[in-house]
Image (cartoon, grey):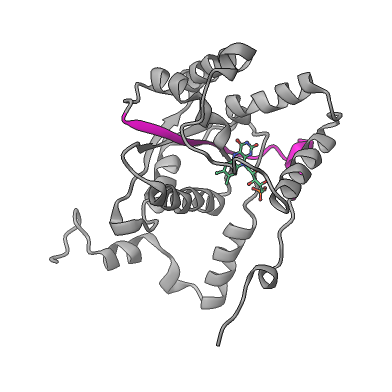
Amino acid sequence: MTPSPAHPTPLEHAARRGAAPSVTPAALQQAVDWAIVSRRSIRAFLPTPVPRETVLAILDVARHAASGMNTQPWRVHVLTGAAKARLSEAIAAVDDDADASAALTEPYHYYPLQWVSPFVDRRRKVGWDLYGLLGIAKGDKAAMHAQHGRNYRFFDAPVGLIFTVPRVMQAGSLMDYGMFLQSVMVAARARGLDTCPQVAFTKFHPVIGAALDIPDTEMVVCGMSLGHADPDRIENTLVTERESAESFTTFHA
Ligand SMILES: Cc1cc2nc3c(=O)[nH]c(=O)nc-3n(C[C@H](O)[C@H](O)[C@H](O)COP(=O)(O)O)c2cc1C
């Protein structure tokens, strides 16, 4: 391929974008590991805006995620300002109406149809840890609903992302999507930004489709909040546990 400014070769592109050749291997490892390990789900953001160029730069990194047969099934809607507020209000109106909310169906099964241990235990722990920090007592349904409803305001983040995939795609594309989403979150960390991936949006796909003019051939995969974490909010002190690598790994030689 003949290199040109408009059409760089992949290597040229990589060299242009990355500082990798000029940093020591140890510094590079530290930086990459830090961006991955320091990612946490943030559920309260400052109003500090994130420039459009930064959002685009993050997506420009994430588009390098691997995908089966290079299908690149991701489509991203970036919401800020009035457009974000309109979507939040439209979803909240349905979420606050118990009958309307109950009538919605998930476009795909994110969670198991039948919860079993240890997954159900981990699910419960993160839920109660979060509610515990916020002082929400077990059984306080109104407080739980209000906290869950913060999802739809993107936890006050200045940027809300809605991710869709063509319905014709299959389970493998959701796997590809996971890589893309993680890349978005890690690229955000590299820029000092935080995120919260949000499957809570998924069941509102008819509301989102209408608000964002998304064709019926597309399915909402999830949403994501993006912005600067509010360091003074108690919910942002939540640190979740992980099993050790040894516990889920078997070496065969
Ligand atoms: C695809 C995906 C969807 C998620 N959806 C939500 C959500 O709707 N609301 C929420 O508060 N957290 C959501 N989470 C965050 C998880 O609860 C969180 O990743 C998990 O508890 C581990 O914590 P950490 O992200 O802080 O490491 C989601 C995470 C993933 C990967």
**Horizontal side, residue 96 vs residue 160: left or right:** right
Residue 238: image location, x then y, percent: 76, 45
Q: Nearer the viewer, residue 148 or 192?
A: 148
Q: Residue at x 59, y 80 (%)?
A: 251
User: Among all residues in the image, which is located at the extreme front?
Assistant: 114
Q: Position of residue 230 (x, y in %)?
A: 69, 37
* Residue 65: x %, y % from top left: 40, 56
Residue at image position (35%, 25%) is: 214
- The reply to whether the magenta stretch includes residue 199 is no
| The C terminus, quarter of image | bottom right
Residue 48's spot in the image, x, y percent? 59, 32
Q: Classify residue 202 as left or right of residue 34.
A: left
The residues colored magenta run 217-239
Q: Is residue 139 left or right of residue 206?
A: right
223 drawn magenta: yes
Q: Tell me if residue 34 comes above or below residue 59 in the rendering.
A: below
Which part of the image, by quadrant, shows the N terminus?
bottom left
Q: Depth check: 234 or 208 in front?
A: 208
